[in-house]
Amino acid sequence: MFTLAIHPAWPGIRSGVCLILLLCAGFLHAAQPAPASWFPDAPTFRHYIWAVQPCPGCTALDAQPRWTRMALRAGLSEVHFKRAPDESGGQAYSVAPNVVVLSPSALQLAGCQLAFLIGHEIVHIAQRHFDEDAIALSVYSGKPAYWTRHGEDAMQLADGNFGLALKLSPLWQQQEREADWLGTLLAAQVCGCSLEDGALAYFRHDEQSGGGIAAAHAPATERIRQLLPFTESARRLMALAPLR
Ligand SMILES: [Zn+2]
């Protein structure tokens, strides 16, 4: 198991609101739908194989049509959703290669905040941040990028290795910025959510979150500041949203 996005992979040094668990099965690379014109192309680096990992107590969630439409706009034909039994994994996280897990409290969020949260996780999957991490961990460890075909092998390089976490921290924060702004735009185009009603309202719940040594996430106040330039882009895409 490996955490990418928001919760601590190394207890006490990473914090935030969602996380990516980099778990999963060998990924079949089926043809994917074309993403929205503004959405970045999928990465071309090689796919690692991710073993199936349990999600204790999780139950399947029927995807709401808007969740599926956000995935399609990100170029993904298939994303699976699960409900976590509690808040122990954070409010939302992604599991490689294509699972989003939501906590009970996440499912109680206002519509646009939940749309942002799901959009954020979909971006991690679409941009294959878990494969990117596996490559980075390998290279920073002095190994060839593809010394193993299995993602877990690469992720285990980070176990207990604080120095490696420090090296990866800038990459994690870059991935979070990408997930924040692209997730905001997915929520705008598909769900008609403004930046204010989605990401900003979500981060204002806890402006003290994030930050710290080797953190995957910048403080919430910094994430808000980084999103403000996308206010107008979100507003324009909102005009394309179906009537709610
Ligand atoms: Zn994230």
Image (cartoon, grey):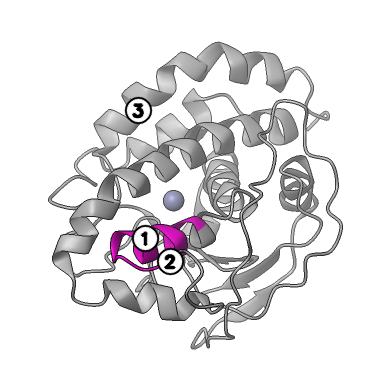
Mark 1 and mark 2: Cα distance apart in space: 6 Å
Mark 1 and mark 3: Cα distance apart in space: 32 Å
Q: How far across and how far down the image is residue 56, in percent? A: 49, 88
Label 2 crowding class (10 Å Cα cut-off): few <14, some 14-19, many 20+? few
> Can residue 181 be seen at all in this image of the molecule?
yes
**Position of 242 compared to 185: left or right?**
right
Q: Residue flagged by tag 1: what amino acid is it?
A: Val
Residue 139 numbered mark, or none: 1
Q: Is residue 130 above or below residue 222?
A: below
**Position of 187 compared to 220: left or right?**
right
Q: How many marks?
A: 3
Comes first in the chain, label 2 or label 3: 2
Identify the element where label 2 is drawn.
loop
Residue 224 numbered mark, or none: 3
- Image quadrant where one finds the N terminus: bottom left
Mark 2 and mark 3: Cα distance apart in space: 37 Å
Comes first in the chain, label 1 or label 2: 1
Residue range corresponding to the magenta coloring: 132-144
**CB contact under 8 Å: marks 1 and 2:** yes
Q: How far across and how far down the image is residue 49, in percent? A: 61, 77
Q: Nearer the viewer, mark 1 or mark 3?
A: 1
